[in-house]
Image (cartoon, rainbow, N blue to C red):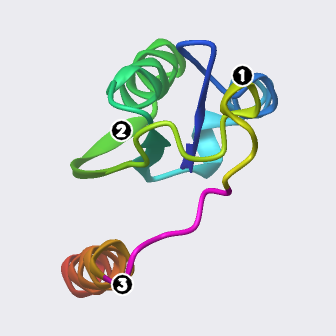
Amino acid sequence: MGGGVYEWRMDKTLREFMKRLDSQKIGQIVCFSTTGYKNSAIEQMKHIAKEKGIAVNKNELLIKMLLKGHSWLGLEGGNLSDKQIKTIINFTDKIKEELQ
């Protein structure tokens, strides 16, 4: 379960999606987020999951974009670095391995 941070909060669409989840149909979620520097979206995802009785996997991934793509800075784009891409691949491989 993941998304970005907008105005220091998790994406509104993601928040609304999570609030509609049926906890009876979900074993657990794994949280990930892109952000400028804060972990707030992941913490907010965990909070909503807890409220709904949805288990949260102990692993999480935070990719810091350091203001890339912010419109008030002139859209530079939020392109991932090769190192970030490798981190994501390693993270997803780890999760897949643990869930088998």
Residue type, numbered disc 3: Asp
Specify the amino acid type for callout 2.
Ala
Answer with mark 1 or mark 3, whichever residue precedes in sequence: 1
Range of residues picked out in magenta? 77-82
To which residue does mark 3 refer? 82
Q: Check contact, mark 1 vs mark 2: CB within 8 A.
A: no
Measure the C-alpha gap from mark 2 to mark 3: 31 Å
Name the residue at 48% across, 12% down.
51
Please, what is the dominant secondary structure of the magenta stretch?
A: loop
> Amino acid type of disc 1?
Lys
Badge 1 is on which residue? 19
Q: Which image quadrant for residue 85? A: bottom left
Position in image of residue 81 (x %, y %): 40, 74
What residue sits right under mark 2 in the picture? 55
Tell me: residue 57, above or below residue 20: below
Q: Does residue 30 sit above or below 39 in this rendering?
A: below
Q: Residue at x 53, y 13 (%)?
A: 8
Residue at point 39%, 26% (across, down): 46
